[in-house]
Image (tube, rainbow, N blue to C red):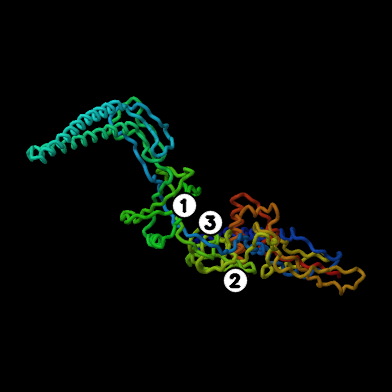
């Protein structure tokens, strides 16, 4: 046999047949699985309608089912509200400051000597003039005695010079003495008078030294810690001194404010207004004392752009302590009949500051507002809001213009109907049997819904045996109830979505403009649920039991022959 008569390449043709056979088998298996999963199992799990007696004809087509499950996503958003109120609001300027004593004195010795006695306790509150300590004064007493003795001697010389002066005047008047003798004696008297004055000054100095030996409090205040113990030598040049006295009543606070507030403060001071100042602790929560503004500095610090102010406090309860850090609030003016709302109601976005206002029909609208002074937890609204308006203070992150809200105390709303129902199952039951359709399902983790468009009423489909056959037939076009039952307790799908995600899904359904858009959203949610269930190892109900996304109505009952 010639080589030209042999077949060319028989193996590739055999391989193609095998591949086609494998593809056909795979398609058949996939079709069978799909048929079982989407047709047989829904029919198996369907709730049968009441059928006719055996021997009836096939039931009619099922009624339209509900577009189930979407009602659970459209319930109102729960929020908390507060009413805008009218109040008189005090406007404060806040600053940081430190407590500064009105007077601080370091008590030092003014003479040299040994410290003999200390008459105070550390931390004692003293008054001006109280005896604090004594220094050895014996040396100064000796000096005083010497000065007094010298003065007596000089006074005797002065007295004798004055007597001689009178004699010379008499002799000069009788022309018995010379003018020179008289003038010399007069000069000697004046010399002795000067010496006596010097002696008096020495006596006064000695007495002053004796007074300095007794150390007294120069001001009223609280004593600090003692620096020198009795028995030590003290000198006038000692820098540490004996003790420090700090005046606590009254006491001052020096604080700073930005330079932008200088004119507002100066205007009040020029009018002679009494500006109240409150001092708070470091955390700014506990009020320590109340006082008044004394003055402000005569220049602005160029390094910080702030000006120093000084306020005075009575401090009778000693709540302010020298060098203590305080927060200062100064009342600069009062706004009468201002509109105020809780600060947490204010939202911020691209349009600026705004609030959600709840209308009487339980829908919200957005109002842009202009903020004013903040006082504690409240803020003044200068424009955009009226007194009595209800504003949302909690739950605003889930709102938008026109959204429906649920207020505390409102009755729980029923699930909202969807716009259209799904397609009902066809009544394919055996003769006289029950038609089957999709069962009602549950939405993903939502509460029970109303069930969309309820299908047509369940057909009676059953006639008495004595009635003629014409009364049966396809009259029973039964419609099942639409899907929309919410997730029952224990529904595994409730574990797949958080409350925030369920709220977002509800908002998407409410904003959908067409049925096609809602169906698309439904398919996305279903795919997400199946994916998460697979990751978490959760078994979801079969499609026929998932009516939460469009379960159809049950089929009509079979009629009597």
Residue 314 placed where, x, y %? 45, 47
Q: CA distance from mark 2 to mark 1?
A: 58 Å
Which residue, given by chain and number where applicable, does mark 2 sit on? 513
Which residue, given by chain and number where applicable, does mark 1 sit on? 278
Q: CA distance from mark 1 to mark 3?
A: 18 Å
Describe residue 425's horizontal placement relative to residue 528 as left or right: right
Residue 463: quarter of image:
bottom right
Up/down of 149 relative to 387, above or below: above
Residue mark closest to the camera, 2 vs 1: 1
**Helix, strand or loop status at disc 3:** loop
Which residue, given by chain and number where applicable, does mark 3 sit on? 377
Residue 490 placed where, x, y %? 69, 52
Dot 3 alpha-carbon crowd within 10 angstroms: few under 14, some 14 to 19, many 20 or more: few
Dot 1 alpha-carbon crowd within 10 angstroms: few under 14, some 14 to 19, many 20 or more: many
Up/down of 180 relative to 435, above or below: above
Dot 2 alpha-carbon crowd within 10 angstroms: few under 14, some 14 to 19, many 20 or more: few
**Helix, strand or loop status at disc 1:** strand
Residue 81 placed where, x, y %? 60, 61
Query: Which of the numbered marks, if any, corresponds to residue 399?
Result: none
Which image quadrant: the C terminus? bottom right
């Amino acid at each position: 046999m010639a080589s030209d008569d042999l077949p060319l390449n028989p193996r590739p043709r055999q391989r193609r047949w095998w591949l086609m056979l494998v593809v056909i088998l795979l398609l058949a298996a996939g079709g069978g699985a799909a048929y079982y999963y989407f047709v047989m199992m829904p029919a198996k799990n369907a709730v049968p309608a009441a059928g006719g007696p055996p021997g009836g004809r096939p039931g009619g087509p099922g009624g339209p089912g509900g577009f189930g499950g979407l009602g659970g996503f459209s319930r109102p958003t729960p929020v908390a509200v507060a009413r805008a109120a009218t109040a008189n609001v005090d406007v404060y300027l806040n600053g940081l400051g430190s407590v500064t004593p009105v007077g601080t004195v370091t008590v030092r010795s003014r003479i040299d000597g040994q410290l003999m006695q200390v008459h105070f306790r550390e931390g004692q509150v003293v008054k001006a003039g109280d005896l604090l300590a004594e220094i050895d004064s014996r040396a100064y007493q000796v000096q005083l005695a010497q000065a007094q003795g010298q003065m007596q001697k000089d006074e005797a010389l002065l007295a004798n010079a004055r007597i001689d002066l009178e004699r010379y005047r008499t002799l000069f008047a009788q022309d018995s003495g010379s003018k020179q003798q008289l003038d010399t004696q007069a000069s000697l008297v004046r010399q002795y008078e000067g010496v006596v004055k010097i002696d008096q000054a020495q006596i006064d100095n000695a007495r002053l030294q004796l007074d300095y030996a007794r150390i007294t409090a120069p001001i009223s205040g609280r004593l600090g810690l003692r620096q020198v113990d009795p028995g030590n030598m003290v000198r006038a040049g000692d820098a540490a001194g004996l003790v420090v006295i700090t005046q606590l009543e009254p006491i001052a606070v020096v604080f700073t404010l930005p330079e932008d507030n200088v004119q507002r403060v100066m205007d009040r001071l020029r009018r002679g207004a009494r500006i109240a100042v409150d001092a708070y602790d470091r955390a700014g929560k506990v009020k320590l004392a109340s006082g008044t503004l004394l003055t402000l500095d005569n220049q602005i610090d160029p390094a910080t752009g702030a000006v120093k102010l000084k306020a005075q406090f009575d401090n009778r309860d000693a709540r302010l302590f020298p060098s203590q850090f305080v927060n200062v609030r100064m009342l600069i003016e009062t706004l009468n009949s201002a509109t105020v709302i809780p600060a947490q109601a204010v939202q911020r976005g691209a349009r600026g500051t705004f609030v959600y206002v709840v209308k009487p029909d339980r829908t919200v609208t957005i109002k842009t507002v202009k903020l004013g002074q903040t006082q504690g937890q409240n803020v003044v609204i200068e424009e955009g809001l009226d007194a009595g308006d209800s504003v949302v203070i909690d739950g605003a992150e889930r709102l938008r213009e026109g959204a429906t809200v649920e207020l505390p105390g409102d009755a729980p709303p029923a699930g909202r109907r969807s716009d259209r129902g799904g397609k009902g199952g066809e009544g394919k039951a055996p003769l006289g049997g029950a038609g089957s359709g999709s069962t009602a399902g549950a939405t993903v983790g939502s509460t029970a819904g109303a069930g969309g468009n309820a299908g047509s009423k369940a057909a009676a489909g059953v006639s008495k045996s004595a009635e003629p056959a014409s009364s049966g037939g396809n009259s029973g076009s039964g419609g099942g109830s639409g899907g929309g039952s919410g997730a029952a307790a224990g529904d595994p799908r409730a574990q797949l979505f958080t409350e925030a995600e369920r709220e977002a899904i509800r908002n998407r359904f409410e904003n959908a403009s067409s049925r096609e858009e809602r169906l698309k959203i439904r398919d996305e949610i279903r795919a997400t649920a199946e994916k998460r269930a697979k990751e978490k190892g959760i078994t979801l109900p079969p499609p026929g039991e998932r009516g939460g996304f469009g379960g159809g109505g049950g089929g009509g009952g079979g009629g009597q022959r």
